[in-house]
Amino acid sequence: MDTAMVKDKRDSKPRHIVLTSHPTPYGAKPIPIHWGNADPLKRGPLIGTLTDPTHRNVIGTHSGSYAIYRALAVVQGSLKTDHRADLTNTSPIVNIGPYPSWADPDKIVALDPFGAVVGDVFTDYFEKGYDIRPTIAITKAHINMPELYEAAAKGRLKLDGEIMKENGDLVVTKAAIEPVWYLPGVAHRLKVTESDLRHALFEQTGGMFPELITRPDLQVFLPPIGGVTVYILGDIAAITDPDRPVAVRVHDECNGSDVFGSDICTCRPYLVHGIEECIRTAQEGGAGVIVYYRKEGRALGEVTKFLVYNARKRQTGGDRADAYFERTECVAGVQDMRFQELMPDVLHWLGITRIDRLVSMSNMKYNAIVNSGIEVVKRVPIPDDLIPADAKVEIEAKKAAGYYTEGEILDVEGLVSVKGREY
């Protein structure tokens, strides 16, 4: 174990902090994790809390990037370092799983399938003093989007009083999921070695997690990234019923469009269309699933995205479909960092084996889903009349790059002619 001496400004007393640790043949060892075991007790709990460092059996800690705010609360004195969550009445409002995919280490490598039920399955560990936290929370809610009420007014949707209330509210089951990476599985999925993956994660986070290098015995990593939210419409049992339809929209976060209605992209209109398809499917007796990933700007970040917007608008010839991806690569060095290879894990957690309506044009998402063993019956593109005028640049460039379409794919000359406004 590597330590350093620091002085705590609150009490002016020097104290030791642990810089990193190393495997040792002596003393207590952390609870082993047998990833992919169908029995959660045999799989083992994931312990990323800091209450007792000797109990930790993962790299990183809970809450993703919000762990930084936890540190601020601690240093300010508003949060005690030994606080333990009171999980009374926090258990899932509905049960999801277990499904055969939960026991397949090739199907799920980027989340903990048992993350929602730690309070039920690891009671013995809690009684022994282990501080185990859920990485999944499942609840119910009503959501309301004005476009959906408008769709009902135009007769595209039914206000059935069950799935869609008379005031336009949707009744949904929703799950929040923190990322949990099984490093050997993630490396295999990305077709790299685990050693190379660990080194890259260590170096590209500025050395934030030395255990990536010093603790090869710890194979689970809680990365400091955004998670995913799942919205389920209709009967959850329909998701795994081969005789009932399932519609799915996998959506990557776009704050500018999803929340504020920016018209430079198709994100909010396509999200709304996906929800419409999910409502219709649920009202047919099936289920609709919206999977919302926190991967702003193709996981390049919003600052990078806005820089690209400026580069696109100011380039010679203006904002053109033929240069759409080029401008992104000039700024970011790469077109996309979402790594859709990890995306299907949430679908496998839900027990999905067939998608009747995949509301996505993305070839990357489609390939990832199909290659993971899930059947896709039909792909649903965004209707032309939902595409904002300034988003024509984006959608035509994407179709030319391989996105699914039932319409025309423009050649280079045609792409040059598709231009957006200045700003």
Image: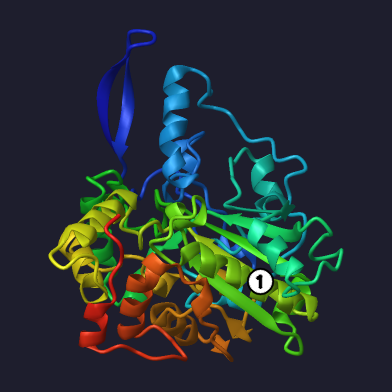
**What residue is at 40 percent from the left and 60 percent from the top?**
219
Give how far across and how far down residue 55 sits, in percent: 50, 43
In terms of depth relative to the viewer, which is nearer, 61 or 216? 61
Q: Looking at the image, is 83 positioned above or below residue 236?
A: above
Question: In the picture shown, does residue 151 fall above or below 178?
Answer: below
**Residue 290, position as x, y percentages in the image:** 60, 67
Location of residue 134 in the rendering, given as x and y in whole percent from the top left corner: 61, 49
Q: As drawn, which residue projects farthest toward the right?
A: 161
Instruction: State which quarter of the image contains the N terminus.
Output: top left
Q: Nearer the viewer, residue 68 or 99?
A: 68
Q: Residue at x 52, y 76 (%)?
A: 385
- Quarter of the image where one finds residue 328: bottom left
Q: How many marks?
A: 1
| Image: 99 above or below 232 | below
Residue 388 appearing in the image: yes
* Residue 23 visible to the viewer: no
- SS category of the residue bearing label 1: helix
Q: Amino acid at mark 1?
A: Glu
Colouring: rainbow
Query: Residue 8 versus residue 226: which sits nearer the camera?
Result: 226
Q: Nearer the viewer, residue 418 or 238?
A: 418
Left or right of 379, for residue 141: right
Determine whether, in the image, residue 145 is placed left or right of residue 318: right
Residue under pointer 1: 276
Question: Where's the C terminus, which quadrant?
Answer: bottom left
Q: Residue at x 51, y 82 (%)?
A: 381
Tell me where residue 154 appears, x and y as whole percent: 73, 71
Q: Would you say 121 lies left or right of 329 here?
A: right
Residue sitting farthest toward the top = 12
